[in-house]
Every structure is written in C-alpha cells, then in structure tokens.
Image (spheres, coloured by chain):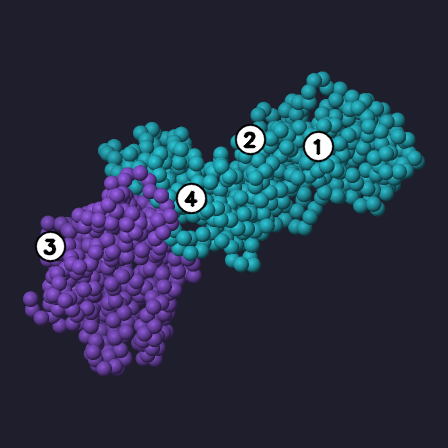
Amino acid sequence: MTPFKPVLLEAVGVPDGHSIASYKSRGGYAPLEKVLAEKQPVDVVEMVKSSGLRGRGGAGFSTGLKWTFLPKDHPGPIYLCVNADESEPGTFNNRILMEDDPHQVIEGIILSSYATRASTAYIYLRYEYPQSWHRLQAAIDEAYAAGYLGKNIRGTTFSLDIYLHRGAAAYICGEETGLIESLEGKRAWPRIKPPFPAIEGLFRKPTVVNNIETMACVAQIARRGVDWFKSIGVPADPANPRDPGSYGPKLYCLSGHVEKPGCYEAPLGITARQLIDQFGGGVWKGRKAKAVIPGGISMGLMTESELDTPLDFAGPGKVGCLGLGTAAVVVIDDETSIVDFLHNSCRFFAHESCGQCTPCREGTSWSLRMLERIKAGQGRLRDLDLLLEIGTTMGMMPGSTICGLADGAAWPIKNAIKKFRGEFEDYIKRTNPSGWMVTDPVPALQIVGAH
Amino acid sequence: MPVVIVDGQEIEIGADERLNCIEAARRAGKEIPHYCWHPGLSVVASCRMCLIETGQRDAATGKVTMVPKLVPGCQTPVKDGTVIVTESQLVKDSRARVEEALLIDHPIDCPICDKAGECLLQDYHFEHGQAERRADLHPFTSRKRDVGPTVTLFVDRCIMCTRCVRFTREVSGTSELMVTSRGAKEEIDVFPGFPLDNKLAGNVVDLCPVGALGDKDFLYQQRVWFLKREANVCGGCSAGCSIHTEHNQDTVYRLKPRENPHVNTWWMCDDGRYGWHHLHDQSRVLAAGRRRDLRGNGHGTPGDAFETIEWADVVTRLRDDLKAAGRLAVAVSPMLTVEEAWMLCAIARSIDPEAFLSLGHVPVVGADETFPGGFTIRAEKCPNRKGVEEVLALYGAGGRSWDDLVAHVAAGKADAAWVTGGYPTPWIDDATAASFADLTCLVVQDLFESPLMKLATWRLPAAGFAERAGTWVNVAHHAQSFGQAIKPPAGVWPEGRLFWNMLGRRGLYDPVGVRQQIAGSAAPFAALAGDVPATGVDLRVRQLA
C-alpha cells in the first residue's frame, strides 16, 4: 500500500492552521472563487454527484443525489443544515476538522449552499465541543470579514449566512429530522418520513442535512477535482448494482485498546487490521483484540477473525454489522468482558432513546434492565433469547421505529449475543449457578438490590 | 373508484377521499389497534401499535408487491390498489410485542383505576397481548399529581401516546402539557405555575387511551361498567355539542362528547362537560304548586305560600286559571325543545287565540370564544333559540324577544303570563320581575327559585337537559333529536309531558310523533320527517333542496 498523504487533515499540526491566512496559503478559498466565477449551481451538484461522494455522517447516502431531491425552481428559502452533533460513541473526526481546519468546513458549506441554492446554513454543534465552538465562530467571523459570507459573495448574486447553533447534548439531535426539530426550538423527536427533509425540512422548507466531514470533502473535491477523489477508495462492486462504491479519503477514529489512539486519514477500504496495526501501533499491552466496533457503537461488533474486513461502506455489512457508520473504530481487547461491553452499550441507548416509539423506548430500557440483572448475578439463559428478540425486532429496518436510533441500539445486542453467546452463557452460569436455567418471569430487580 | 384490498377483501373508497390504512380497514370491518393516532390530531406514528403489512397491486398485471417491512397504518395513506394485511403472523407478533413493551412500566393497577372497563390497554392486551409476562416486574407504584384544577395525572399509567400534548397544542392552542425527560423515564407534565386550566381541558381525559389522565369530577365516583349512556345534546350553549350522557339509576355521572362532524367533531368544553350538576341540586323546584290565595296574600316564605297540586289536576286547573284571567302572554324558553315549544304555542292559542307569544329570556355570557383548532364556545347559553324562533314564526310571532314580552306585560296589555324557563343559573332580576307583579295569573315554570317565581300564581318545575326528549336547533340551524337520558326527580313532569296532557293527547308523551307532525305540517322543519340521524340534520339544506 502506497503511503497516503492526509488531505482532510492537512492542517493538523500546522501552527495557526485554523486561521484563514493559513488556509488560503494552502490553496483554500481559491476553488470557491473559481466556482463562483465559472460554474452554475447545477454544475457543482453534477461535480459532487460524479465524484461518488457518500455522506460521512453514518448512513453513507450519496451526497450529490441527496441534493437533487430538492424541488426544482422552489421559490425558497432552502436551508442547509450541517450536522456537527457528533455524539456517536468513539467518534471525533468532526471535532478535529472543526478545531484544526474550520475554514475547510466553511468553504465546503459555501460550495454546498451554492449548489443547493441555500442562502442560510445552520451548523448544529454538539454542546460538549467548546473549542470547536470558539474556532468555528472565529472562522465564520473571518470568512465574513474576507467577503466569503454575507450579501453578494465575491460580487455575485449569491448570498449566504451561516449560523452556528449549539445543541444541548442529546444524541438524538444527530438524527437529521431530530436535528431539524431541535433547530426549530422543539423537542428533538425525529419526524415521520415522508415527507423527507429535501421536500419539507427546517421550518417546513426544503432542507439538506450534511455532515461536517462531507462538507470538508466537498471543499477538497472542488480543489482537487473529481478524478482525484475517484482515484481513492473502493470502486463499485460490478456484481452488486446497488453498490455505488466507496470513494475518497476517510477519517477513521481509532480508540479503545490500541497503543496509539487517534483520528487517522486513510483511503476508504482500509481493513480494520491494517488500521490497528499501521496507524494504531497494534492492540495495547501486547494483547489480542477480542472484538472491534467498526464505526461507532451502533454499528455492532466484528470479531477478531473478521478484522480483515475492508472498512468501506459495504464492508462491515458483510460480517453482520450495521454498516460503516462514522468509521469510529473501537478496539476491545481479549481481557475485556463482552457482558460489560453490552451493558455499557445498552446503558447508552437507554439513556439516549428519545422515547417516542414504544419499541425503542421500552426495548432499550428493558434490555438495560436485563443486563443489569445479569451483571448482578441473576441472569438466566432465557434472557439471551429475550435480548436477541429485542435486538432483531427493534428498529427502522423491521419497521418498528421512526428513526435509526433503535437499529443502532439493536445491533450491538444482536452482534454481541450472536457472536459471543458462549461467553454470555459462561458468565450467566458462573454468576448464577442456582438460577441460570429458570424460565419463569423473574422478580423485580429492586428486590435483588443491584443499582 | 379506487379499490383498496384489506385482508383480501376489496373495498371501494371515494375518489377524493384521503384515508389512512386504519380508516380504510375500518370500512372493511377490520379494526387496526392504535393508541397515538386520533382523527382530530396530527399523526405522530409513535405508539407503533398499528403496524401492518402493506403492498401495491399492479393495475395492469394484478401482481402484488409487498413492502418488505412493517409500516404504521396511521401514517400510510391508501390509494387505488393498496393492499393491507392486518392479520399476518408478523403483524400479530408485532402487536404482542408492543403490548408487552407498554406493560413493562405500567403498574397494572386496574382494580383501582378509573379507566378499567373502557381502557384500550386492557382491550388490546386481551385481544393482541400475550398471556405470559416476560419482563422483569417492577414494584407497584401509582404516582400521581395534579396537572390542573380538573385533571389528575397518574404518571406510571401513561403510555406516552402524546394525544393530550398534541390536543393542547393543536386544538385548544394553549400548550400547557409537555413531555419531560427522555426514553423510558419520560413523563407528561406542565410547566410550574402554568396548570392545565383551559376551557377544553377535560377533553384530554377522553383522549387518554389509558388511565393516566383522570377527571377529578368523575374520579372514583362510579365504575364505568355500571354506566349507561344515552345520545344527548349539551344544553350549555347554542353550539349544541353532541354528547353522551352517562348515568346510572337516574343519576348523571359524567358527560362525554359524541363524535359529530357537523357540530363539535370530537370535543366539548368544560362548561358543558361539568354543567350537569344542577340536575341533582337539592334546591330544585320539585313539585307543582298553586298560590293559596290568588293575589294579595303572598306573605310568608314562598314554600308556605304554595299548595302542592297533583299533576292530573294541574292539567285542568292551570288551563282554567289562565282562561279566567283573560289576555295571555307566553314566553317560550329557548331551553325547551322544538316539540315542547310547538305544543306550548298550541296550548296558548287554544286558551287565548290572541295570545302574545314571544321567545323566552336568552342568557348571554361574554362573547363567542373560538379556539385555534376551530372549536367554538358560544356566548348564548341556551341550546334552542333558533328552534323556538322557527316555531314562533309558525304562529306569527317571529322576531319577538323576551324584552318585547316584558314591555307588553309592563304596558298592562296582558292579564296572565306563562313564563317557561329551565335555566340552570339565575337569570332575572327583581326590577324585571316587578313588571309581572300586577298580573291576575302568572305561571312560572323553571328549575330554580327566582325573583319571578316569588310572584308566581303557579309554580311549576322544569326538566333539566338530560331529562328531556326532543329536538334542539343550534346556532348553525343544525337540528339534533335526542331521547331522555334520565328520569326527572320525583314530582317533576318534563314540560313535554304536561303540554301533551294539556293538549288532551292520549297515552304517553311521544316526542317523535310530535316531531313528525311538525315536520309534516311546517316547511321549515320538513327535514325532521322520518328518522333523524344521530348526528342531526341541517334544516336549511333540506329547504333549499
């Protein structure tokens, strides 16, 4: 594999790399001026579409295609929402971009707004990122001063205002319609679809919601061209007509039990093992990996034997994971209990479920209670079947919920129990020698006295 | 016509109808269970009880393509060729799981819950749930708190359908209720200092599919399975909301709105909802009485001054007294039914062919109040002004108001007056009543004592709204016929029964027969011929036709 020179992370380590002067010295904003002078919005849409850029937020939907869903000749306003509510456990690539190279993001937002004919863009920022908040706001102010934002940018008829909105620390605000509701000042309960945001989104107007990293990619495509972008990554599988390919560089967030955790840029399609060994310096303390989360906790688990799976948009799905997600790779070493992992995962989703749909609200909470009971030494083998049933019936894919949070909660449960059932059974038999075989309904946990 | 296929059964729907799967399936006689969906509120599709399988039949080939996952019936519109499957194993399993999930945090305190017996959670669990409880049992709790002066929230019973929250946002427009917290810990609540106290607040109790929202007025008063319900019309204002009067052993326990797309849709106001207590007020006039001496000897308390007269004697002696007195003036109360008003006018004219007829007092409080959802509470606090006016017009007394009658009497143009009332609240002051002081014979027929009744020669009890049968015409000319819900208290004859007997009719008072007689003889009421549907008829529409 040829050494890959970071593009999106080019400013990392550059002194004052977050300033507009530094960004321009690296060639920034010149592509924007060129586009504004020479191209029509449809050309930009076509450019992004032909680059094969897929959204970096988690679902991996084609960005250019998403833009074409906007109604033609709409009188406006059309809104662009940039999703910076980065709350998927293990994920921090947006944070690096916003803190170290905010102008790259802003240039991408301006280009995307131009393409979608949006004159207002909102950045929905995760509450827990104060540094990003300061850096982004400073960068927005710089961009206004330099004439890249505001009325009639660079003498064209195109105007754009960017508003930086700070969320209140809820995972569900990262769901695109939850984000829209939250921006409108409401409780972030994801909306039922249809209508999709492209038709009726923020303030009931056509809206595009894109991720921060997607915006940075748009800026790089404008700067380096479609061919450069398509030269990186994994081409479409000719055997699968529904696979649009996974092109471009990707920021992988490597964390957990590795020697050198961090955010690394690599071409899409690098395998988990390569990522851990080449970038992460291997599993820590000389241990072996037991499991690896491919892209944020909601994507499920890969076992050690599945580590050669390429981390592109299609790869993790082939080993029973939900997808690439945010490409946040979390390594779990062989001395960690998978029961603990699942307990932690269930606790997160029970806490973050918005509570709108019954299967998710009660399913996440019930699975947490079962895990708490198992951890308290009151587990039964039957609980594993119940957990698996919850895991397979909860979510958008079986159709039982409005948004994908439940799928994200279900996948770790499903993967952990299917792939590590033996360990769960051993744990239950060991900690509950007298009751593991009971199949009757169990008494209340409070009587057990745990938690 | 578009055709929808429900469990293999083809149902035609109107070309312009916008139905969802729940409504379409209902046409085929299939009930898709649902909690959060309500036709009067926005769709949130969050309870997931109405998950079904759907598909599309290709018009050309007849081939059916199914959606590969479950979809909410409430959120899925039907069109030509839509296939709905409500009873597949997948659907049944899904319903059982939703039921199971809803019961995880539910206290299952049915024995002490007011909703038991009319609870969707009970009904659906019986029909769609599973016998075994697989979830970890939770200790029984029954936390409750007031969310407003009339409503108590039983926190743990709530299944988070958010119907109540949406009602306060979309219909009453007052937005008192909200959801707090997240996930399984979320609760319905109000903001401190902003209680649920709008005039439509009681509707949230009706909307609640479980026992989470309790009506303090009804709480612990009666188990619902003892209640009998009669389709009635609210007499609280001229909107004439369709209601169910729910009663047991001639005692009303609560009123519920009855769905009527022409009048009140699904709602009623709290003034109407709690406006039945006067029916059981101990201070009601409960017997027919005649003053012991006909004039000039009215000293002492009113109770002492009157001699109770048997109703059979009232029928003849009242007529005799009025005839003997001379020129008659009659106030026809807007609380009377069309049938009663018509009979009263007939009696009046049979006693004195020149009798002065007018509308009775029309109570008005404030101004009409319209809520963002379109519901209007009328300022006119009587149910049948339009109906009585139409009847008066038939007798050549159209347009005459209560003030005209007072002026007529004050001017000494009458020797006798018969004032009908039926007003649940005080309605006449001493000064107005004084105009009637010099009459030879004054008949006052009302629910309660009043300055006017103090002067009466004849004191007659009136019936309350649930004790009447007949027809009321609301402010929009919409006529609704209804039956008697409860018997009046012992000693009280509803007006219709007295009038019926005074007209010399035989047998029991037959309001339907009287209505058909009116409809057959008077063009403005032609629409009331035959059976009147439960939702009523618009009198004007039939006239135009």
Q: Nearer the viewer, residue B339 or B482?
A: B482
Q: Is residue B57 left or right of residue A161?
A: left
Lower sequence index among marks 1 and 4: 4
Q: Residue at x 12, y 69 (%)?
A: A281
Q: Is residue B91 visible?
A: no
Q: Residue A212 falls in which quadrant of the image?
A: bottom left
Residue closer to the observer: A344 or B408? A344
Point out residue A229 in the picture as x, y percentages from the top left corner.
15, 66
Report the Cα–Cα distance between label 4 and label 3.
Answer: 44 Å
Q: Position of residue B472 (x, y in %)?
A: 64, 34
Q: Identify the residue position indicated by label 3 in the image.
A: A305
Instruction: Tell me the amino acid under the disc marked 4.
Output: His
| Badge 2 or badge 1: first in the primary sequence | 2
Q: Are marks 2 and 1 in contact (CB under 8 Å)?
A: no
Q: Is residue B270 above or below residue A200?
A: above
Name the residue at 33% across, 60% down. A171
Q: Element at badge 1?
A: loop
SS under mark 4: loop
The disc at residue B463 is: 1
Q: Residue furthest right?
A: B296
Q: Which residue is mark 2?
A: B226
- Disc 3 sits on a residue from what chain? A
**Distance between the alpha carbons at the discs numbered 2 and 1:** 24 Å
- Of the residues shown, which amino acid type is indicated by label 3? Ser
Residue A272 sits above or below residue B76 on the image? below
Q: Which chain is purple?
A: A
CB within 8 Å, label 4 to label 3 = no
